[in-house]
Amino acid sequence: MRIITIIPAYNEENAIAQVVNCVKKYSDVMVVDDGSTDETSTLAKNTGSKVLKHDKNMGKGAAIKTGLESAIKDDYDLMVLLDGDGQHDPRCIPLLLDGMDGVDLLIGSRFLNMAPQNMPLQRRLSNGITTRLIRFVTGYHITDSQCGFRVISKKAAPFFVDISYNDYVYESEVLCKASEKGLVVAERPIQCIYGNEKSYVRARHVVHYVMFTLRLLVRKLLRRI
């Protein structure tokens, strides 16, 4: 079985080499540099990783779609998604892969069977609200809709390339798309490391996400009519 880990990254020169070197123990690696202005691409290439780079910053969702398109073309069976800032522990990759039997999309959950340690309060609150909304709309009994540490099957990947969102909304829309296509979604517990990682979420992203949630509610109501 061919497995690749796709790492979307934006200005992660301080972490990317260590992340890639850890991931290489478990799978092939592809870094998608989303228009970084630092040495992210150079440092990733120095590890021997495949590197794709956007000419400009297009958003995390766009970076993930670029990676998925490449992995589909190269005929990979499973695609792991993992952030490039060092927050996700690559040692959890085997645990997630073990949960993929009969599953199309597996999400690493920071809330399953444990309370997340050191997660910023605002993240915990926003994640809780969003996860409840996603559960309501999709019917998936998930505990962590926002975690970017995921595994996608070869069957499911083409559906997730065909999503219009390019920013942080993309990861929520993946679950909606999975529900529309009748895909099997599961979770496995993971732990994350929270430090001084940068946040690139801007006010316009918040507004965009609010609009997305309103559309989700309308979508759910229309299904009931």
Image: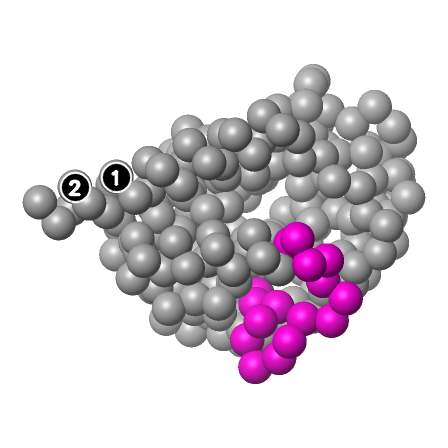
- Magenta part of the chain: 108-123
| Residue at numbered disc 1 | 218
Tell me, yes or no, whether the highlighted magenta stretch contains residue 118. yes
From this viewpoint, is residue 7 visible? yes
- Between the residue at mark 1 and the residue at mark 2, the CA separation in whole angstroms equals 6 Å
Coordinates of residue 75 in the picture (x, y in percent) = 49, 47
Residue 78 is at least partly visible in this image: no
- Residue 211 on image: x %, y %: 42, 32
Query: In terms of secondary structure, where does tag 2 sit?
Result: helix
Snapshot quadrant of residue 49 = top right
Is 210 placed above or below 138 here? above
Q: Position of residue 224 (x, y in %)?
A: 13, 49
Q: Nearer the viewer, residue 38 or 73?
A: 38
The answer to whether marks 1 and 2 mark residues whose Cβ atoms lie closer than 8 Å is yes
Q: Residue at x 66, y 30 (%)?
A: 202
Name the image quarter holding residue 25: bottom right
Residue at image point 64% right, 54% down: 123
Q: Is residue 136 left or right of residue 57?
A: left
**Residue type (three-letter) at the residue carrying disc 1:** Val
Disc 2: which residue: 222
Tell me which corner region of the image, top left, top right, bottom left or bottom right, holds residue 183. bottom left
Q: Is residue 103 left or right of residue 195?
A: left
Q: Left or right: 19 with respect to 178?
A: right
- Name which residue lies at 69% across and 18% down: 56
Above/below status of 187 relative to 60: below
